[in-house]
Image: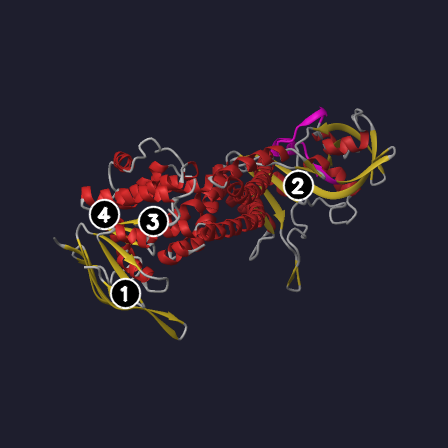
Amino acid sequence: MTFIESLRIALRSLGSNKMRSGLTMLGIVIGVMAVIAMLSIGRGTQAAITSQINSMGTNLLYVRPGSTQSSGVRTAEGSAATLTLEDGEALADLPNVVAVAPQVESFGQVAYLGNNANARVLGVTPEYQDALNANVASGEFISAANVTARSAVAVLGSEIANTLFDSADAVEQTIRLNGQSFRVIGVMEAKGGTGFMNADTQIYVPITTAMSRLSRSGQFRGGNTVSVINVKITDPSMQDSVVQSISDVLRERHHVQFQDDFSIQSQQDILNTANQVTGTLTLFLGGVAAISLIVGGIGIMNIMLVSVTERTREIGLRKAIGARKRDILVQFLTEAMILSLAGGVIGVLFGALVAQIISGVQMGTTTLNTVVDPDSALLAVVFSACVGLFFGSYPANRAASLRPIEALRFE
Amino acid sequence: MSQVIQIQDVRKIYRMGDIEVPALNGVSLQIEQGEMVAITGPSGSGKSTLMNIIGCLDTPTSGSYILDGVDVSKMSDDQQALIRNKKIGFVFQTFNLLPRTPALDQVELPMVYAGAPDRKQRALAALESVGLGDRVHHRPNELSGGQQQRVAIARALVNNPSIILADEPTGNLDSKSGVEIMNIFKSLNRDKGLTVILVTHDPNIATQAQRAIRVRDGMIVNNGA
């Protein structure tokens, strides 16, 4: 018996009970739809985070202070106060370095009239703009003169500006930051972002101002140590050589003997970590959805078993006129495969539709972003076919091993 | 004339748990090519068991069965399926047509399993030969009982079998259709030389055969020869 023949026979028997076939297929449709929609959310999140990280510049290195060691006890990375503004200046002269932007980080309470917010406050130099692709939407960024004069000026992230001023113009207004007056000289362009990485909720002040007036912890106050030095390099391919020369310069300057008192992280490292996290998320979402696909498979098995019982006489007749075990097996497996494959394809279409609909939906502060990639669509269809094969094989085997005389006598 | 069926001392014992139920107690039977034979007997006589063995639907517990020169008594399920497909044409009391399937497809089915060529032409010819040339696209629910049984006969004929094995072929038909069906069997036997075996408990049918074999208590009490 050829494949076309078994396909015809299977289609005829499925078509003879359209309602039942449709409902059985629906189980698979819903399962695949859930898988596709969930994977699209995972992939979308991954794409959003990747583009966000890339928007800060793909050729960026972060130099952070290392951990302190007191009596042999190592504290957290970045807790040491070893990097200084002078270190930054020294790095600026290295080959293949485009811009060096040291920064000091703290958190502050910011207020304007009745509105207030808690924001991440970055003390920066003018080079920050170039190094991190940060552009002002209105007004201007921190200038070298601001840094020298330790001016009480601030540039607001777009979301912070919205929170404090609604739609009014923030430039030239005076805000209060940790109880001190700052003049707003600019508002940044919106970069879009989620959670802990959101650049739109930051406030920028001159790095010298941050050191002398804002830092509460005392770690930076009065001193000239920085939390991060952002180094922009000419090309990602130069990364390794630049990392090497930065290390050389810093070891020389810090008189390092055994253990580096700084660490260098590239944008690529961060991207890899983020991809690992979102990859796990995608897998988890897909896995949860796959459970419903398996439930759909059990539906197929259930209906096939009913169908085998109902068609016992038909199976007996087919065997009497010459069907071998294999012919019957193939016939019932084909039916299961048609149900699961057609369900899979329809499910992919519906899943893509659902992904399209939920894309852009606001959930709290983040926007859902969905991407349906052909890989996961193919995977879902293949998986649903396997589900059909697996759950169809038991009923098909049962049909194939019916004895013709008993099957013919069955009422 | 050659013998198409040679059954030698066949026994069939069914096991039901610990109890052994003998259905056939040493049956020997020869049927010649081109004979029209009726097998009769009361229910429980072993008539159906004998038919199942002749039809290669079951294997004997002991004894030998040579069909058309081939020993089929110890064949595997799939080998038997092949024999049924090529050498035996079945006609059942309840017609056993596939539901919702046009007559032409019903008749093509044995050739589908045989992988035979020219299915459509051969199926059409078989339907013509039983007088259903104008009903080839009708489904079973659009056909009368007699017409359905004729589709079943066309299906039985289409692979050019050695024997036609009919189990109470007129049992579900009115007397007029029954006569028509019997006439088809008679003409197949007379004009085409086909071996026809009728299993029945209807004495009227049995008398229309050239030879009536009577089975009782798992043995042949009259082999009609």
Tag 3, which secondary structure?
Answer: loop
Q: Is residue A100 visible?
A: yes
Would residue A295 be counted in the magenta stretch? no
In the image, taking residue A239 as reference, residue A41 lies left or right, namely right
Residue A236 x %, y %: 50, 37
Q: Are marks 1 and 2 on the same chain?
A: no
Mark 1–mark 4 Cα distance, whole angstroms, equals 22 Å
Circle on res. A197: 2
- Judging depth in this view, the residue of A81 and A370 nearest the camera is A370
Which stretch is magenta? Answer: A120-140
In the image, taking residue B172 as reference, residue A138 lies left or right, namely right
- For disc 4, the chain is B
Circle on res. B60: 1
In the image, taking residue B197 as reference, residue A299 lies left or right, namely right
Residue type at mark 2 is Met
For the residues carrying marks 2 and 3, which lies nearer the camera in this image?
Answer: 3
Q: CB under 8 Å between callouts 2 and 3?
A: no
Residue type at mark 4 is Pro
- For disc 1, the chain is B
- Judging depth in this view, the residue of A338 and A168 nearest the camera is A338
Q: How many marks?
A: 4
Near mark 3 (Cα within 10 A), the count class, few <14, some 14-19 or many ≥20, is many
Residue A400 x %, y %: 38, 54
- Judging depth in this view, the residue of A205 and A203 nearest the camera is A203
Circle on res. B169: 3
Q: According to the image, label 4 marks what residue? A: B161
Residue type at mark 3 is Pro
